[in-house]
Amino acid sequence: MESVRRFWRQVGFVLEEAVASISRQGWMSGVVILTMSVSLLILGGIWQLSDDIYGLSRAIGGKVEIMTFVREGSDAARLSAAIRQFPGVTTTVVITRDEAWTQLQRDMRSELSFENLLDDNPLPDTIRVKVDGPDQVTPVADRIRQLDGVEDINYGRDLLAKLQQIAAFIQAAGAIIVGCLLVATLAVTVNTIRLTVQTRRREIEIMQLVGASNGFIHWPFLLEGMLFGALGTLISSPLLVSWRTFVIQRLQELFPFVPIEADSMGTVRLLANLLLVGVGVGALGSLVSVKRHLSSG
Amino acid sequence: MIRLKQVSKIYPSGVRAVTGANLDVEKGEFVFLVGLSGAGKSTLLKLMYRAETATSGSVLVSGTDIGRLSRGQLPVLRRRIGVVFQDYKLLPQRTVFENVAFALKVLGTSRSEVDKRTRSALDLVNLREYSDLMPGQLSGGQQQRVCLARAIVNTPPLLLCDEPTGNLDPDTSWDIMRLLTRINQHGTTVLVATHNKHIVDSMRRRVVALDGGRIVQDIARGGYPVGVG
Ligand SMILES: Nc1ncnc2c1ncn2[C@@H]1O[C@H](COP(=O)(O)OP(=O)(O)OP(=O)(O)O)[C@@H](O)[C@H]1O
Ligand SMILES: [Mg+2]
């Protein structure tokens, strides 16, 4: 019982110390927090940019529809119902050859008059198939092709392949860049936090001298590092939010036909991730600094 | 309390700081360690609280061979030993009270206990009314008394002092020695490394003399040895 109480008193002491030490170290803490926030800003900015571009490429891919042309004499409605059962299919719409013909004539009227040229409707019944996401397009298309009564399909295979390549590239490149930035952020953090460990050499020495356990000695620094990370994230957050808004606007201008939603959930997720990274990097950074100090001393 | 058996210390640089030292200190004793600069006094003390480890031989504190303590067991030893330094080693950004309380707080002592013990330690060294000052606002002698208060606040059975009066004038030095005597009278074993011939001569305590890393003299009620320092 007493050992439990002792433990909580030590936790309280550590918390007090971490907060007090940040204010006691004044400008030094400022330097650490600013360095971390700049690092996190770059990291977060690029992370989110690659995320949004990836999302965009998928959104474009998601726009792809599979146009299924029905063989003459087959039942378009029955085919449509069958296709709707396929996994990955969201909607199917039947456009009868008459509707298509009317539509085509309406579209073309201003440019060229068909009316006398073609009396006979050359179009087949068509089923417009929408799928869940770009990954579903090819497998669904392959299944549709096997169906009896399907004359032909068309789904912009080349465009889709390109888009998938681009998306994969962005995802990979983004991961690599973010990974590198993470390492860089950690390095910067270790080096700045080392300054604060240096200035607290004597404190560490005294703690060891009066018999604080080694684990206990780490805690104030660990917490301080986490606080540095949290404050760094806090500072970089508003800038990141405006950066994301800006990026999304730009992307929307470039691709007006794809609806890009700057969902607040995405922003929240980004900031939460960044907070996690900030706190984690801060904790790791100070742990590394203290470990180095203890093993060298 | 302390037993050294054939203890030698060779620093990585190759310096032989202590050679073949044998020493027995009983519980409650007051011992001076004297010798020229570089004789190995500080090294001997450091071996006792394991700031350094012996190259050979064994150092026993309360029957425990401290050379065999693991990293995890070291804090337990340290809690039983108070250390006072020539340069005080106070934390400059904490008040006098906080400096002393620090030693208790890192061990998870309860708040009321911290307050009580810190106050009585500061009472003992006569610095109660300086509680809220910063170390920088104190004289050398006062800072040394804070260091002393911190060393004894956890009531360790053993107190090691490395030239506690090294930076102090004679009057202030005597203040510190009187305090150490008082602490010793409470049952604490006290070891003091010093150059202060006058104090050693007047106190007539046990004197252990070092020369070139060897213990060359050990006198029960001695003075500062002739030909040393
Ligand atoms: N950390 C160290 N590394 C290498 N050599 C050391 C170290 N500490 C002390 N020495 C050497 O060991 C010898 C004994 O030093 P020590 O500090 O124990 O002497 P001392 O008796 O305390 O001297 P002083 O009276 O000047 O404090 C000296 O030659 C010193 O140079
Ligand atoms: Mg010395």
Image (cartoon, helix red, strand yellow):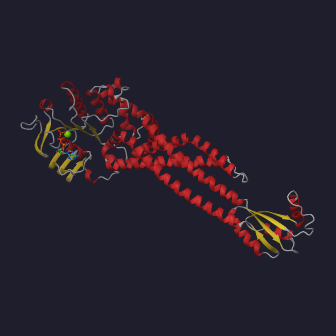
* Residue A281 in the image: above or below residue B125: below
In this rendering, position of residue A5 left or right of residue B90: right
Q: Is residue A102 left or right of residue A289?
A: right
Where residue A229 appears, x then y in whole percent? 50, 44
Viewer-proximal residue, A127 or A89? A127
Q: Residue furthest top?
A: B129
Look at the image and tell me in which quarter the C terminus of chain B lies. top left
Q: Quadrant of the N terminus of chain B?
A: top left
The front one of A66 and B113 is: A66
Q: Is residue A74 above or below residue A185?
A: below
Residue in view at x 37 percent, y 29 percent: B95
**Residue A148 location (% of width, % of height):** 81, 76
Is residue B92 something one can see in this rendering? Answer: yes
Expressed as whole percent of the image width and height from the top left, the position of residue B79 reads 32, 42
Q: Is residue A95 above or below residue A291?
A: below
User: In the rendered view, does B19 fall on the left or right side of A47?
Assistant: left
Query: Residue at position x 59%, y 54% from top?
Result: A50
Location of residue A100 by image quarter: bottom right
Q: Does residue A11 appear anywhere in the picture? A: no
Q: Nearer the viewer, residue B37 or A72?
A: A72
Q: Residue furthest left?
A: B227
Residue B133, located in which quarter of the rendered image? Answer: top left
Q: Quadrant of ligand 2?
A: top left
Residue B6 locus on image (x, y percent): 16, 52
Q: How many marks?
A: 0
Foreground residue among A97 and A177: A97
